[in-house]
């Protein structure tokens, strides 16, 4: 579920799609329908093709594959168009529109037909996930963007890369050994960060990405192509950061493809309540008394990762000062607190998330919209631990330089609620 911020509606002339856009959208919908109907519900016991829309970020224009429940869209050939209300943030996601759940993809210059279809299938899975009781959740894994959490995740990437390549080459013994290494590393990381929900979030985003890649792997050639894609993503991840909301895109498909080979009925177990990792652990031999620290030392040597570990530790130390500076913005200034009263929000899942003590998580950028209006944060916004409030550094004497853009709807205003705290309230005037 790739999330990006958006702007509001523009003039009316820009909200009518061109003939070329309508024609292209119809072609894209037909390709998606063909791929999903060829599955015929076999993968998850449910048809994946359903209400789907493209949304244009600047105008909020919709091009949809079907009419909405209340006939709010205009028909043009075999597709429909209209406007997504401004209180919806444009994103690649699944959302409720006009009383129905839709797979939603942002219109843009798609990298390739293949990547467009992967994205559409991914969001189509999100559309039906509640129906199969694999409910959405927010990531509570900001440890993956700092210290040992990030380092141990990248070591897991290394092991999974070796495992998926061994799978492709029919080397099952090597694959199982590398799979075991990946779980040893994950066990240690979760031992150090017991408040994580990695395994649960992996069933949210990881299964969506697995489904997309699985349905693109229709023969030996495309299966090899998907394996190469997974391997390249893992290798690229070794140089990246910002994994709190994105790690499952890399790990989930690999675990899924491996389980297809060693435990073909694994999806039934996941549908009954187990996580992907629960099922993986049933297929690898790890003693309860194993010394995880010693095992990881051996794994580092096995993958010739000594220099990699030193470099990562150096990067972590060099970035600590910049992160501390961002945290200080919240510690040493007034704040604007926005009650999370069914607020729509969107963010880039590839951005790094910084943990602020026990208070919350700091995102670099985010878009909020609600009854009050809209806010686009560009230089830091915090969500407290229980997701009750969004918090911004704020000074009423420094308008325009607070690190966010705000548009308040008529009848709303910012008010001081204590010495250093402000809030947005509905005016009584």
Image (tube, rainbow, N blue to C red):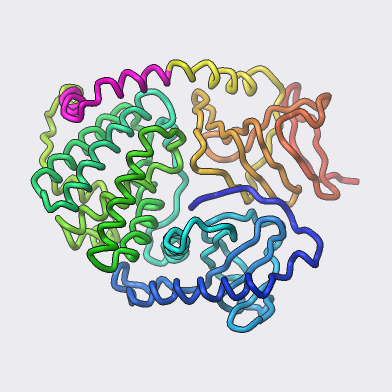
**Residue visible at 68% across and 64% down?**
84
Residue 148 higher or lower than 226, as above or below = above
291 sits left or right of 371 in the view: left
Read off the magenta span.
Answer: 295-316
Depth order, front residue of 154/99: 154
Give coordinates of residue 397: x percent, y percent. Answer: 83, 24
Which residue in the rendered view is the most extreme toward the right?
A: 429
Q: Which secondary structure is most common in the magenta stretch?
A: helix
Q: Let me know if residue 60 is in the magenta part.
A: no
Depth order, front residue of 220/426: 220
**Residue visible at 16% across and 22% down?**
294
Q: Is residue 275 visible?
A: no
Q: Let me know if residue 306 is in the magenta part.
A: yes
Give coordinates of residue 412: x percent, y percent. Answer: 82, 45
Q: Quadrant of residue 68?
A: bottom right
Which residue in the rendered view is the most extreme toward the bottom?
A: 77
Give coordinates of residue 22: x percent, y percent. Answer: 62, 74
Q: Is residue 406 visible?
A: yes
98 sits left or right of 297 in the view: right
**Residue visible at 42% across and 20% down?**
315
Q: Quadrant of residue 298?
A: top left
Depth order, front residue of 242/280: 242
Residue 320 higher or lower than 254, as above or below = above
325 sits left or right of 117 in the view: right
Count numbered badges in the picture.
0
**Residue visible at 71% across and 31% down?**
403
Give coordinates of residue 411: x percent, y percent. Answer: 85, 48
396 sits left or right of 149 in the view: right
Which residue in the rendered view is the most extreme toward the left?
A: 173
């Amino acid at each position: 579920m790739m999330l990006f911020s958006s702007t509001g509606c523009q003039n009316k002339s820009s909200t009518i799609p061109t003939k070329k856009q309508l024609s292209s959208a119809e072609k894209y919908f037909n390709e998606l329908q063909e791929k999903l109907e060829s599955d015929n519900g076999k993968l998850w016991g449910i048809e994946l093709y359903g209400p789907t829309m493209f949304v244009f970020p600047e105008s909020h224009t919709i091009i949809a594959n079907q009419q909405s429940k209340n006939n709010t869209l205009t028909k043009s050939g075999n597709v429909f168009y209209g406007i997504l209300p401004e209180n919806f943030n444009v994103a690649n996601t699944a959302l409720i529109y006009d009383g129905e759940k839709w797979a939603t993809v942002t219109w843009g210059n798609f990298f390739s037909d293949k990547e467009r279809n992967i994205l559409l299938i991914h969001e189509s899975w999100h559309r039906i996930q509640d129906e199969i009781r694999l409910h959405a959740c927010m990531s509570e894994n900001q440890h993956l963007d700092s210290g040992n959490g990030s380092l141990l995740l990248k070591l897991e990437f290394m092991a999974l890369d070796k495992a998926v390549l061994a799978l492709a080459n029919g080397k099952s013994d090597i694959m199982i050994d590398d799979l075991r290494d990946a779980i040893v590393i994950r066990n240690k990381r979760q031992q150090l960060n017991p408040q994580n929900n990695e395994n649960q979030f992996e069933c949210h985003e990881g299964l969506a990405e697995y489904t997309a890649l699985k349905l693109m792997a229709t023969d030996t050639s495309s299966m090899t192509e998907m394996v190469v894609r997974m391997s390249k993503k893992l290798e690229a991840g070794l140089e990246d950061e910002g994994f709190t909301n994105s790690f499952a895109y890399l790990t989930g498909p690999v675990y899924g493809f491996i389980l297809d080979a060693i435990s073909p009925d694994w999806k039934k177990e996941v549908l009954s309540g187990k996580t992907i990792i629960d099922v993986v652990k049933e297929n690898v031999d790890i003693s309860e008394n194993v010394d995880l620290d010693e095992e990881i030392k051996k794994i580092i040597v096995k993958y010739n990762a000594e220099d990699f570990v030193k470099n990562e530790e150096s990067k972590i130390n060099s970035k600590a000062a910049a992160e501390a500076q961002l945290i200080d913005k919240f510690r040493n200034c007034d704040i604007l607190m926005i009650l999370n009263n069914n607020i729509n929000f969107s963010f880039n899942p590839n951005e790094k998330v910084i943990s602020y003590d026990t208070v919350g998580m700091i995102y670099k950028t985010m878009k909020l919209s609600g009854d009050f209006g809209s806010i686009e944060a560009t230089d830091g916004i915090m969500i407290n631990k229980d997701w009750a409030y969004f918090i911004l550094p704020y000074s009423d004497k420094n308008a325009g330089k607070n690190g966010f853009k705000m548009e308040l709807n008529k009848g709303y205003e910012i008010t001081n609620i204590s010495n250093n705290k402000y809030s947005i309230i509905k005016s009584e005037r």
